[in-house]
Image (cartoon, grey):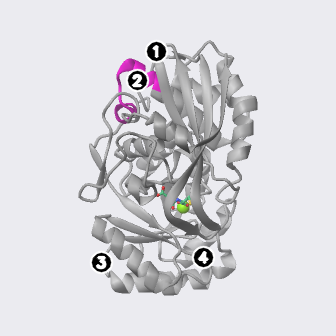
Amino acid sequence: MPLIRPAAPVTLDAVDLRVLHMPLVSPFTTSFGTETVREVIIVTAETPDGRGWGEVVTQSEPSYSSEYTQGAWDVLTRFLAPALLARRTVAPEEVAGALHHVVGHRMAKAGLELAVIDAALRAENRSVGEYLGAEKDRVPSGVSVGIQSDPRALVAAVGGYLDEGYVRIKIKIKPGRDIAETDAVRSAFPEIPLQVDANSAYTLADADTLAQLDRFGLLLIEQPLQEDDIVDHAALAQQLKTPICLDESITSVKAARDALALGATTVINVKAGRVGGYLEALRIADLCESAGIPVWCGGMLETGIGRAANAALAAHPAFTLPGDVSASARFYTEDIVTEPAVLEDGHVRVPTGPGLGVEVDLDALERFTVARETLRR
Ligand code: SMG
Ligand code: MG
């Protein structure tokens, strides 16, 4: 059975690219550093029937992955956008093939693909939820909590998010900031669904330390080792009771298949940007659903554009664990859409309007823009 009902091709007149700098409500610290401003690329696909919006989820530095904003900007302006514009028309399902000759750069490709998906679906009056196979009108919302100054501050931060209604907590860990932190949160909140994310900060030599996490009844540990440590993750899995969930390592459906075959992961974090787009994300979800592997939707501090698409993806039946699909206010005091995602009873609503189902606030977009380039056919 095909994964989706295809959308009609759109005529691409222009691709507009902007770099935005959006201040975060509070600093976000992970094992690889602290962010205070989200640097993101917003893509507009301009067609005779209207615009479509996409988001490139790179960060300013190549720390979560090898991709970063200036690199994405370069490949988008010199290679990817020109390749799409060279075609008279393009359907969403053709974008990945049209960009296949460029190796890697999946986040950049995913942002372009999302803009084409949005333009095509708006023209057909179809929602991205319907397109991606969403079967829920709202999704449970988990929150990702950065490394804090000490365990007490972490417990206070987690308590605040629980008061807001988040249904699952994920805390970031790194060597030296792991066992005491997790212990403090678990002691303060014995019953909550809790998971940890190491963002590649450990090596297999740390297996004994990581095994100490087993006593906290975690849902999973996310990406303990490096992106290409697939065999080491499989070895680590033998030494832990806590399920391993790969994030950074899963760059494609093939990578997912390989990691599962090797026993490197038993849960998968699906992020459209990391895998080159929402259609590849769906292929991974489909693979996991067939294999009985739980998946959940990861987050990259998306603006209201990517957040709408993530809510739709997370409403697909393969997504059986709460995702990092939080309210916009978790990261931003001001978003670039007119109706930012809010938390309602621990859930975020799946937009139902045409395309992404959100309208871009053009004034806000303009105010956050620090660079812009329009490429035409
Ligand atoms: O959007 O809620 C969000 C962020 C979730 O922690 C989050 N993302 O490794 O899963 C992850 C990180 C990647 C971005 S942090 C630099
Ligand atoms: Mg992660």
Whether residue 193 is situated above or below residue 116 in the rendered picture: below
How much space separates mark 2 and mark 3, taking CA atoms?
Answer: 43 Å
Circle 3 is placed at which residue position? 191
Is 125 included in the stretch rendered in magenta?
Answer: yes
**Mark earlier in primary sequence (1, 3):** 1
Residues under numbered marks 2 and 1 in contact, where contact means CB atoms less than 8 Å apart: yes
Q: Nearer the viewer, mark 3 or mark 4?
A: 4
How dense is the environment of label 3, judged by Cα within 10 Å: few (below 14), some, or many (20 and up)? Answer: few
Q: Quadrant of residue 13?
A: top right
How dense is the environment of label 1, judged by Cα within 10 Å: few (below 14), some, or many (20 and up)? Answer: few
Whether residue 247 is situated above or below residue 182 in the rendered picture: above
Residue 274 screen position, x and y as percent: 59, 48
How much space separates mark 1 and mark 4, taking CA atoms?
Answer: 48 Å
Q: Amino acid at mark 1?
A: Asp
Q: Count up the numbered dots.
A: 4
Residues under numbered marks 1 and 3 in contact, where contact means CB atoms less than 8 Å apart: no
Quarter of the image that includes the N terminus: top left
